Image: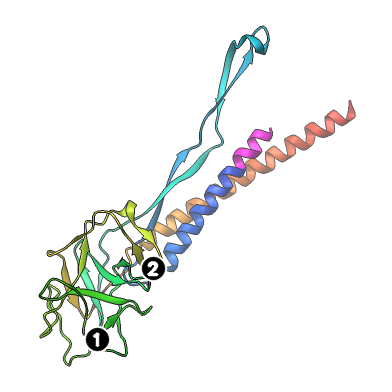
């Protein structure tokens, strides 16, 4: 009976994590470039039970059965499928068509990647994220450079070349979802195997919408609600049985 309570407790923890993950995805349905996170669950380790034969010192057991405590979250990863395109009137907005990511410079000197092309221009005329991180490109010498966005007009072609500057957007490709480390809703650190990309299209005055499917997420949320209710019934039944057992023992 106590084991059933432990199993239900594990299941409640699992359902809560899944609910929190779905809620985060739904909350970012209107966040440009957001990639929804999926959780992968697995069965917990099975513990084997047995009866000792002729005393425990003989190391002989008669196996009875195995027991596990339900499921657990095994890993989480981002679904990197392409989002939709939304036209804007801002020259500082960009969307990508393809697998690559924009590359930005972090305050510590490292680099991060993002699909959120809702950019701004800082006081020095450089293109930045809304958080103020510099968007990176390469100059004609192949060196890392900032994106000069103060020129009028500020135009970028579909290959990522900034008009009359010799600078091209630095797009990071070969990004595996399992290697992304989230450092914000749409910003990720990434270390292994990064390469530059020449195939992804850069679309100015467009934004990539979130790839969250609201219908699918709402269905999953309703399924979670039913699972919560089912586990509450199991918990209530286990509690009643345990209470009855304790009371009956007390009468003996």
Is 244 situated left or right of 121 in this image? right
- Tell me residue 4's x, y (percent): 64, 35
Classify 10 Å Cα crowding around label 2: few (below 14), some (14-19), many (20 and above). Answer: some
Q: Is residue 225 visible?
A: no
- Tell me residue 87's x, y (percent): 23, 79
Magenta residue span: 1-8
Q: Is residue 74 visible?
A: yes
Is 111 situated left or right of 142 in this image? right
Helix, strand or loop at mark 2: loop
Q: Quadrant of residue 80?
A: bottom left
- Tell me residue 71's x, y (percent): 50, 40
Label 1: which residue? 89
Magenta stretch secondary structure, dominant: helix
Q: Quadrant of residue 152?
A: bottom left
Classify 10 Å Cα crowding around label 1: few (below 14), some (14-19), many (20 and above). Answer: few
- Tell me residue 189's x, y (percent): 34, 62
Label 2: which residue? 29
- Answer above or below: position of 223 versus 247: below
């Amino acid at each position: 009976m106590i084991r059933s309570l432990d199993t239900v407790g594990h299941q409640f923890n699992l359902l809560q994590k899944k609910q929190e993950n779905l809620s985060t995805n739904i909350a970012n349905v209107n966040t440009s470039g957001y990639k929804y996170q999926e959780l992968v669950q697995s069965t917990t380790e099975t513990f084997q039970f047995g009866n000792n034969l002729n005393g425990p010192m003989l190391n002989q057991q008669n196996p009875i059965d195995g027991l596990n405590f339900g499921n657990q979250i095994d890993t989480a990863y981002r679904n990197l499928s392409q989002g939709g395109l939304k036209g804007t009137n801002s020259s500082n907005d960009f969307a990508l068509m393809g697998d690559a990511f924009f590359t930005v410079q972090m305050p510590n000197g490292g680099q991060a990647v993002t699909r959120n092309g809702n950019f701004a221009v800082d006081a020095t005329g450089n293109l930045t994220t809304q958080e103020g991180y510099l968007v990176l490109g390469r100059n004609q010498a192949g060196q890392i450079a900032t994106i000069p966005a103060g020129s009028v007009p500020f135009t970028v072609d579909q290959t990522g070349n900034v008009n009359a500057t010799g600078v091209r957007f630095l797009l990071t490709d070969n990004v595996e979802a399992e290697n992304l480390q989230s450092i914000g809703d749409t910003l990720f650190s990434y270390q292994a195997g990064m390469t530059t990309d020449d195939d992804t299209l850069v679309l100015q005055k467009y934004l990539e919408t979130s790839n969250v499917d609201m219908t699918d997420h709402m269905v999953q949320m309703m399924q979670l609600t039913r699972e919560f209710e089912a586990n509450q019934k199991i918990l209530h039944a286990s509690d009643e049985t345990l209470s009855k057992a304790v009371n009956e023992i007390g009468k003996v």
